Amino acid sequence: MKLRRILGAGAIAGLVLIGIPTTPAAAQDDPVTMTIGLLQDMSSPNVTVGYLVPEFEVWNLQYATLTSKAADDFSTIPGLAESWVESNGGLTYTYTLREGLKWSDGEPITADDIAYTINRSRDEEWYNHFSTVENLDAVAIDERTVEITSSVPDPKLPTMDVYIVPKHIYEPISFDDLESYEALDGVASGPYSLTEWRSGQDWTMVKNPNYYGRDNGIDRIVYRVFSNADAMVAALQRGEIDAAHNFNASSVEQLQNDENVTVVAGLQGGFTELALNGMAGGIGDGNPALQNIDVRHAIFYAIDRNVLFDRVALGLGSVGTTLSPSADPSWIPDLGDEGFAYDPERSAALLEGAGYVDSDGDGIRETPDGDPLVLRYIVRSESTDAAPIAEFITGWLEAVGIGTETTVMDDTQLYDAQVGGLYDMFVWGWTPYVDPDPMLSYFTCDQVTYDVEEAGYNDANWCDPAYDELYQQQRVELDSAKRREIVAQMLRLFNTESTYLVLLQDPDLQAYRTDRFEGWLQQPANTGPVLFTNSSPTYENLSVIGAEPPVTDDGATEGTTAPDATTAPDATTVDGDSAATTVAPVPAGEDDGGSNTGVIVGIIVAILVVGGGGFFLAKRRGSADDRE
Amino acid sequence: MRARFVAGKVFGALGTFVFVLVFNFFLFRVVNDDPTGKLFRGRNLSQAQLDRRRQEFNLDGTKFEQFLAYLKQTVSGNLGDSFLSRRPVTTEIREALWPTIALVGTSTILSMLIGIMLGIAAGWRRRSKVDVGATSFAMFTYSVPDFWLGMVLLAFFAVRWPWFPTGGFEDAGSTATGLSALLDQAHHMALPCITLTLAYIGEYMIVMRSSLLDTVNEDFLQLARAKGLRDVAVRRRHAVPNALLPVVSLSALNFGYVLSGAIAVESIYSWPGIGQATLEAIRGPDFPMLQGLFLLFSASMIIANLAVDLLYGLLDPRVRGR
């Protein structure tokens, strides 16, 4: 037995030795690497397949767009095109490309690449392109000029934010083969190109030497996928990673107390709403009481969104107002006193007025027909906030005499219940694009589900011809001030008439270390996140702390700020210590490729102990057998 | 061993496999038979685009047509493409397989060896200090949930004392190859492996101990002692081989579970294995991935069971006689 104990102890010692802390062997010529931690892997780097947040960041870096978006306010700024001219009453735009543009593999980027991408993605209805290019036709006039004509007035123009793919790579790939294309060609027009993706683990983007914009001095960006948010936070504090995206709200305080870390609660339009069943589709079994607008308003007045913000969202993000149609918060109008501020008395009065009284004294009101007013509330199992929100809301509703029955469902079940109209209320959320059109379109009558086989996006199950008319108007309104006014009218109407109460504006919780890189940019300014934003302007604006500023082609030294960028102090940066911007550069857990002595010694010891022990045992067994 | 015995077992296994093949298709479609709408919620797709995707997913025909297409495809060795990544399911599974085999395989072997040794030590000297110590240790690690143990080990040995990485299969963006890549992987595997090993030890230890206790008072041991054999020889040559039978079947069955991964521990340590792939597929729901994964799980269990049956035939002559 003694021997085995020694063996066991040796094996454990070996394992422990594997973990001896190691000093990074930071060689001088190591590439400068920035590592970003996140909780979600890519679904696919193929721009005609992928649809998750991580791949949009990859495409934002790999594929420059014809026009880009300013970090501050999403306004249209030059991208591959340096200028553009409007003609034909706003239907046609002629774009002039920058001079000397090249793909990362050295091929020239020409107007042909632009026209090819727009026309092919329209004909083949590529998922991430089609809604933008549906009515467009592009013609390459010469190497640097492309003319884009819309068949209908399109207020999104001159913004052209579809990812332009390299024609010389994509042309040989047929429509049938396109979806199974792995898209690891690494041919980029943007600042970085994707070179490796290890599914479930990480992906690496390397600097594109031919990029037209600023060189930030960072050679590689590695995205590391965590499945444990707390481990990701620990990795950030240890310096294993330089930034982290989407951790738990409960980690914010811990990170705020770390002087080398800045926390950002960035808003980009995502929201959580309470949806009541308006039964506009005419299918399902929604409670008829909800078609009475006074009952809906009574429910809205009974809910205290400030408490949800403080207690569930832990004060991160902001309180909801009306539908948030864009990543740009300036689209949301001021609702004045129509914002359904918490008012349980008014709620009760509305119910009384509508004939809903508690006639049997059980605390639950009865409908005018005499049935108890009890609503079926579906709680999403895939959201950690859904259960606490349900606790609060059901309590508030009970206080005004509305009973609830809660059922927990995963998103697939909830989706089925929603399109089938088989619910009274649920809490779910949306994330909008920058242009408000898609989000606004979801609540038109066209998007109501009348037949579950042809389900639409309208999960308010509500529709109003007045809203639809305004929707059609804004769709073709080329005067941007007028369009904003129409959208504001739609949002006010939606707020008072629809079945939605927007509870919370949801933040992207991000944090970055302040000791290796500086120049992090929020998009939009002051309120947005720094990473995984609509056009990812942060990367180009970063600099390595302590590194010589890169020198531009004309010999001038660049500042740390790109021309269209902002470094304005940020209101929603929730760092407790604003002075903690720069400290002495620390070699922050740079990956050292596993070359560390502790590991080697540990493994060798383990092998010796196990191997030697095995040999000794075998010998012993042999001699014992002999003795028998 | 008789050929009829072997053939019977093999045919039984094949029959089970065919049943699983059919059952798998219907199992995942019970709750929802068309996740397309949910998968593309908020993606601003037209009805025509959604219909096209439905067609690509083979979700557009009747259930029976879908089933025939599934059978035809699976029988020809093609598990289809994942709904989420559009990559072949076989590629997705292959990529997740090696991390899982490395982690769960190593910890199964380690826990088996350590558990059996502890079980022998404890069972042979009942109520001794070794027995009390080993039994308490095994009961503790067996009853502690593996995810809790994982979190505690992570909190101490990756955060409080940063000896090990906070997770992952190797250093992020690592370009290491050969030995240095292996060492890097071993460094990353240490904590999850210790977690799983501790979690699995108890099972082996307890089964080994009780089986040995049953054997200790058998007449043939008295006889062996009467022959004048040393205690060690009695234990090794006569007691342990007879007591090993239940442990053999337990081990073989547990090897069948290796390919199922370890969802909780893989999650805690961001380990890119089969457990994580399963979780992702369930979240989709990604029918082709789920079908492929469950086919793999069933196949490995069926093979492990077959191995147990055949092994028993070898080890215990009474079994093959029947």
Image (cartoon, coloured by chain):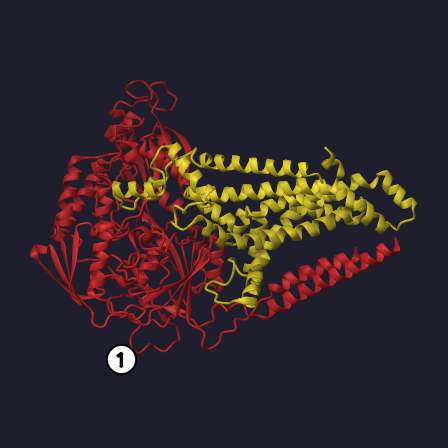
Q: In which quarter of the image is residue B320?
A: top right
**Residue beneath the point at 41% across and 47% down:** B82
Asked whether the viewer can see residue B261, the reply is yes
Point out the residue furthest to the bottom here.
A555
Q: Which of B255 and B318 is in front in this view?
A: B318
Drawing shade for chain B: yellow
> Residue A601's x, y, as percent?
64, 69
Q: Report the side of A43 relative to A119 (left or right).
A: right
> Residue B307's x, y, as percent?
65, 43
Q: Which image quarter is the C terminus of chain B in?
A: top right
Q: What residue sits right under mark 1 in the picture?
A: A556
Write down the chain letter for disc 1.
A
Number of numbered discs: 1
Residue density around tag 1, few if under 14, some if 14–19, many if 20 or more, within 10 Å? few
Q: Which image quarter is the N terminus of chain B in?
A: top right
Which amino acid type is marked by label 1? Ala
> Residue A112's x, y, as percent?
20, 63
> Which SS class for mark 1?
loop
Q: Which of A116 and A466 is in front in this view?
A: A116
Q: Which of A209 and B64 is in front in this view?
A: B64
Examine the rendered structure and indicate whether residue B71 appears above or below residue A546: above
> Residue A430's x, y, as percent?
31, 45
Q: The red chain is which one?
A: A
Q: Which of A467 and A358 is in front in this view?
A: A467
Asked whether the viewer can see residue A570, the reply is no
